Amino acid sequence: MKTILCFGDSNTNGSNPDKVPPRHPYEVRWPGRLQRLLGEDYYVIEEGLGGRTTVWDDPLEPDRCGKDFLPAALRTHRPLDLVILSLGTNDCKSIFSASPRTITRGMSVLVDIVKRFDYGPGGQVPRILLISPIHMGPDVANSIFETFNEESAEKVKQLAALYENLAAQTGCEFLDAAKVAGPGSDQLHMDGESHRRLAEALAPVIREILR
């Protein structure tokens, strides 16, 4: 059985843009859909947290720093065949004032953690798949998410090319989520249809990586 860790933010956790229910059911969320598509020869672990960043400590939402939690997730779920890193949206918050290049540097820190982690005797370093975020809706600056503004929306659009270049430099795989999915009514989170499209785009990529 191939073990896959999906390490991401609220769009991995399944936040529902329509708020009822507040979180999509497991069978709607992309990791759950991915599990069904891949079948019993794969074990898909969902590790999503709303507000999670790559390396930033958010004073308004504590305990969201991916750099701090990733080692615990790797230790908990080892041995792993593939780690999917799907972060970057929250790094675009106005309170961090981080450029797209700086955000990409944060992602590179996570890649380095996965590559350098001690997986134990006989443990192998898993493959890594970087997913660049979906874009934000055109009215995100007026949404309920007060730390996102027009600049945040522009920043997130620049991450795909930067993440793809990072993947090439570090021997990782890459997928641009914005090519298959987008935000729902709240301007930030995917609806069920986008979760479906993302899972369907990922399944053949993962089969190729882990064949």
Image (cartoon, grey):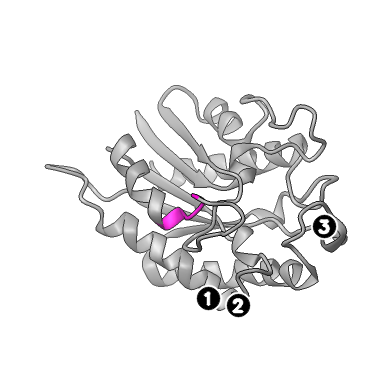
Q: Kindly report the distance in space between the C-alpha atoms of the residues bearing marks 2 and 3.
A: 19 Å
56 w.r.t. 81: above or below: below
Q: Secondary structure at mark 3?
A: loop
| Residue 153 placement (x, y as % from top left) | 75, 66
Magenta run includes residue 121: no
Say if 93 sits above or below 26 in the image.
below
Q: Nearer the viewer, residue 69 or 205?
A: 69
Residue 95 visible in the shown view: yes
Q: Residue 34 in the image: state x and y as whole percent.
A: 56, 33
Residue drawn at x 63%, y 75% as measured from the top left: 97
The quarter of the picture where residue 50 lies is top right
Q: Amino acid at mark 3?
A: Gly
Q: Residue 159 placed where, x, y %?
A: 61, 68
- First in sequence, mark 1 or 3: give its number: 1
Q: Main secondary structure of the magenta part?
A: loop
Mark closer to the chain start, 2 or 3: 2
Residue flagged by tag 2: what amino acid is it?
Ser
Figure quadrant of the N terminus: top left
Q: Amino acid at mark 1?
A: Thr
Q: Which residues are magenta?
A: 63-67
Report which residue position mark 1 lands on: 102
Q: CA distance from mark 1 to mark 2?
A: 5 Å
Image-quadrant location for residue 21: top right
Q: Secondary structure at mark 1?
A: helix
Q: Which image quarter is the C terminus in? A: top left
Are circles 1 and 2 on residues that touch, CB within 8 Å? yes
Label 3 neighbour load within 10 Å: few <14, some 14-19, many 20+: some
Q: Which residue is mark 3?
A: 137
Residue underneath mark 2: 99
Kindly identify the residue that appears in the image at 60 percent across and 71 percent down: 161
Outermost residue to the top: 40
